[in-house]
Amino acid sequence: MIPASFDYVRPSSLDEALETLRDQGEDAKVLAGGQSLLPLLRLRLAYPGTLVDVGRVKELRGVADRGDHILIGAMTTHYDIVTSPIVREHCPLVALATATVADPAVRHRGTLGGSLAHADPAGDLPAVARALDMEFVVRSADGERVIPAADFFLDYLETALDPGEILTGIRVPKLGPGWGFHYEKFHRTAQAWAIVGVAAAVRRSNGTIEEARVALTNMGPTPVRATAVEEAVRGAELGAGGVLRAAASRADEDTHPPADLHARPDYRRHLARVLTHRALLAAAGTT
Amino acid sequence: MTEQLDAGVAARQIKESDVLSGAGDGREVGRARRRKEDARLVTGRTQWTDNIQLPGLLHVAFLRSPMAHARITRVDTSVARTQPGVVAVFSGQDFAAEQGSLPCAWPVTEDIVLPDHPPMAVTEVRYVGEAVACVVATDRYKAADALDAIEVDYEPLDAVTDMTAALEEGSPKVHEAGNKAFTWKFAQGDIDAAFRDAAVRIDRTYVQQRLIPSAMEPRAVVAQTDGDSFTLHSSTQIPHILRVMLALTTGIPEHKLRVVAPDVGGGFGSKLQVTAEEVLCLLITRRLGKPVKWTESRSEGNLTVHHGRDQLQRISVAADADGRIRGVKVDLLAGMGAYLMLVTPGVPLLGAFMYSGIYKMDAYDFTCTGVFTTKMPTDAYRGAGRPEATFAIERIVDELAAELGMDPIELRRRNWIQHAEFPYTTVCGLTYDSGNYEAATDRALALFGYDKLRAEQADRRERDDPVQLGIGVSTYTEMCGLAPSRVLGSLSYGAGGWEHAGVRVLPTGKVEVVTGTSPHGQGHETAWSQIVADALGVPFEDVAVIHGDTSSSHKGMDTYGSRSLVVGGVAVVQACEKVKEKARQVAAHLMEASPDDIEFTRGEFRVRGTGTSRTIQEIALATFAAHDLPDGFEPRLDAEATFDPDNFSFPHGTHLCAVEVDTETGATKIRSYVAVDDVGSVVNPLIVEGQVHGGIAQGIAQALFEEAVHDADGNLLTTTMADYLLPSAADLPDYTTDRTETPATTNPLGVKGVGEAGTIASTPAVVNAIVDALRPHGVHDVPMPCTPERVWRVLDQARTTAQSTDGGL
Ligand SMILES: Cc1cc2nc3c(=O)[nH]c(=O)nc-3n(C[C@H](O)[C@H](O)[C@H](O)COP(=O)(O)OP(=O)(O)OC[C@H]3O[C@@H](n4cnc5c(N)ncnc54)[C@H](O)[C@@H]3O)c2cc1C
């Protein structure tokens, strides 16, 4: 398809970008890697008046170690994240999940900020953000605020970002020692979005699970934490046969999985249970 | 896949040394030459239709029906005409007097319902995507923008989406004449006796889902005129047929119409068509006197490129207790979609003679009913009729084996035509000239490690492993090399199946080959060069191949149905023979010898028993100079030939597939895939390998991934590649490929065609493997594509219904 006409600006600083957004109001859209936005334009599902391309805004790009957390610039590409030694060392779950996104071409253009701001529940990174309790640093011409992941995803493709705001960076807390991670993605082709995905982080100690965090991709209009599972596995002894499976069987509690061409809700529920079990096993290092 | 190879058995690998030295006898044929056309194709330094720029070029965008079935009550283009950059806006009414009806060249029965098919709908639309109006503007974007300003009022009519329901009394009608397009029957032998006397009978229903051909290059058309004559560039497989058909449809005299297929990026049958857009671009150019271009978007293509498959197959097999097949009965519903396009009704007939596969049997009975629905018309798609037939027979043979508790290979051995029995006339009346099913199967079994995998399967079943192993067999054959003109005539096809070639020897001894085939990715420039290099003894590099333009390649039947080498390549050989004969005359004259005493080897004419010789290059120059030629000799070596085959060709092979099915999620993983194909003699192993790989991928895609899905209102839901899933390399296994070579006896090259073989073979191999994995769970079928969700549901149902016989999805 062919997009409708739009204006295009490419500011070279964050302030300039923020001013443009303030002036243009709701009619403007931030353009990051374009991997989600451009398809929407081409299918004429979105008609923004102006695209503000932040690709030249250097301060939005890169990964930094900030002591108790990692700060990832919103414009850091999937590829740069997968290959970042800091990310791999301190938040491997982000690298694991990002490596499953689409294909190399998309990973070289698409960005972490774009994935989160787009808030597609089928995207892999929103669930990871929930599992790791990331914090979103957001700027507008009026100032900066920080939004916790739990408050960021409001609905299908809808976030707490106001028009005029740019997501500048993502803080990923360091979880400390003893954690194992896994992202279990179920999809039909390597390039396709997850039918269901499970992000799991598990802290082990003396053969038991001290703490677990589990978040689900594509099990509702927003990414969800599988709190029932998290509670059920706390203190579980590893190797004690059915405990993990029993806990995982609660993965679909309080979810509202969508129906689409790839799966109906009952199948998604089933997958969530099976995949959560697998993700827990893998994160706990028992597979 | 080396770990699966039995000791001492290694699959054929193409080595660099093959590329350089070939068979080592100096012959070009048989060498794994890299394709000479590829550098320009893969770098895009070529004239794809959409690359064409012309002064004053205008761009066309089509407004397409959002409804599957509706009466058009009003089209208002007045506002659209005032939009920026808009040059003209047309509705169907504007062309009603001159647009004619899109042609169907294959009216399979005398009483077929052949509905009028206006390129742009005038009074009624019958599928989502049918063109109702178009904008011509100064650029593509303005044309697309102005579409929003066209107002169309529709009066909705009922959609007809299900073939079985469409045939019921009282179903809404797609056309006044009803939803049945035709019924075509064919029977041989006493089918009732075969079924009456048989110890076992198995009945199955298989669904060939609708597929959307997805060529790499989208369709594109550029039309231009100098006021008198017209040139149409199109991303088509059939420039020659298109020219004839467009002349008949638009009334532009054939000699005033040039059709060019420049480099074309894939077709798979989807560009074997006379499309609405081609006709309309020509009409718009005629109306405006200006050049126009249209290039489809991918979503537009998913809606409006003709679709493939869409059959409901009821098949029954009767057999003795020892497994001997007695007869096969087929009752087919073939989805036509809303109209009959170029060969729409003929596609199921191309399968009609293939349901007996490689097997001997006493009787055969085939009925096919063509059914109209309010969907995009179907037409040829890689394999066209033969994948459907092969799927049904190879699936049900596996079912028969399961029923009898026999190994599926053993059952096949008992029934297939023995090597010693060739040539063999099948129950369907086709004479298979050659084949060696034993050799191909034995080779495949060895490469696959069949016994070891069966042992692993037993072990997993024993352990009740959540991941089950399945083994699928497909011992296919197909008829290709379309086609003997007489046979086509007897099947009511509107044209012949011959092919034409011209060979021109230039003064410096370089050679131009003019072929009537129209390559769109197959590598004819390379293969034809190899053939000519051997036939005339000139270097491979000295041959150029000209194709695809009706002004330079004036005669041809184009490329489809794995026909190019088998028919077109043979025409090249025959033209070369004529060139050689002429050159022999000149050589004899120059060396003062009798033509009978002239030997020809590797480009050299030599007087037998002497040291006197002339190269073909010397002869070329002497003929050009024409100073000293035999009396009455026309000063040219050039020659043409038109070859019409006596028979089809029958590639065959054995494909074996091992899958791991995760019974918890329903996911299928192809663990190994072995293909041993017999495509007769091989001109270029690298090209054969490429065709086999791509073909298998496309067949696996039908088995596991692709499906055009419509809702109850007839809306296509799979308009993007996020919804219509195509596998990429990452989703496909490594293939182990090998060949046996049993030359065809029906053509001088011994070739059989390889364009469709992989696609025909692989779909049943994969589905057989999945069903084999799940059989202990009570599963007898999984409808295609075998998505994880479907597998899971089938398993779920089989577990709850103890004696389930049907997947029921
Ligand atoms: C073929 C294909 C397959 C894909 N498969 C997957 C997959 O498997 N898993 C997956 O997770 N994703 C997948 N994606 C999406 C991909 O990850 C995208 O990169 C991502 O969704 C969006 O990132 P982007 O940088 O391209 O954002 P854009 O497309 O540029 O923007 C997306 C949205 O976010 C807004 N936005 C972007 N950056 C900011 C910012 N800094 N501040 C405020 N708003 C902003 C934009 O305005 C827009 O609304 C796929 C994409 C393609 C094309």
Image: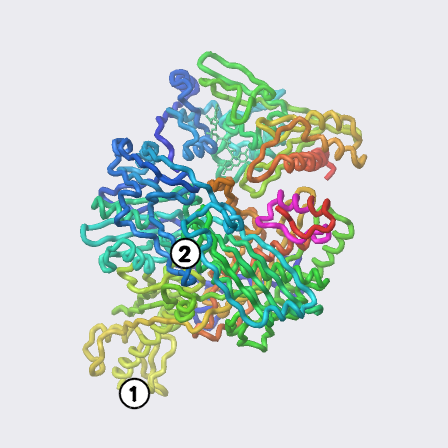
Q: Is residue B392 above or below residue B77?
A: below
At which x and y percent is residue B162?
A: 52, 47
Counting residues from the start of the chain, the first of labels 2 and 1 encountered is: 2
Residue at the spot x=44%, y=24% of the render?
Answer: A30
Q: Are marks 2 and 1 on the same chain?
A: yes
At which x and y percent is residue B699?
A: 54, 54
B486 horizontally vs A193: left or right = left
Q: Amino acid at mark 1?
A: Ser
Q: Is residue B72 above or below residue A146?
A: below
Tell me: is circle 2 under 8 Å from ligand 1: no
Q: Quadrant of residue B140?
A: top left
Q: Is residue B801 above or below residue B572?
A: above
Residue B704, which numbered label?
none
Q: Amino acid at mark 2?
A: Val
Residue B113, which numbered label?
2
Depth check, mark 2 against mark 1: the one in front is 2
Instruction: Say whether residue B103 is magenta.
Output: no
Is residue A178 at least partly visible in the picture? Answer: no
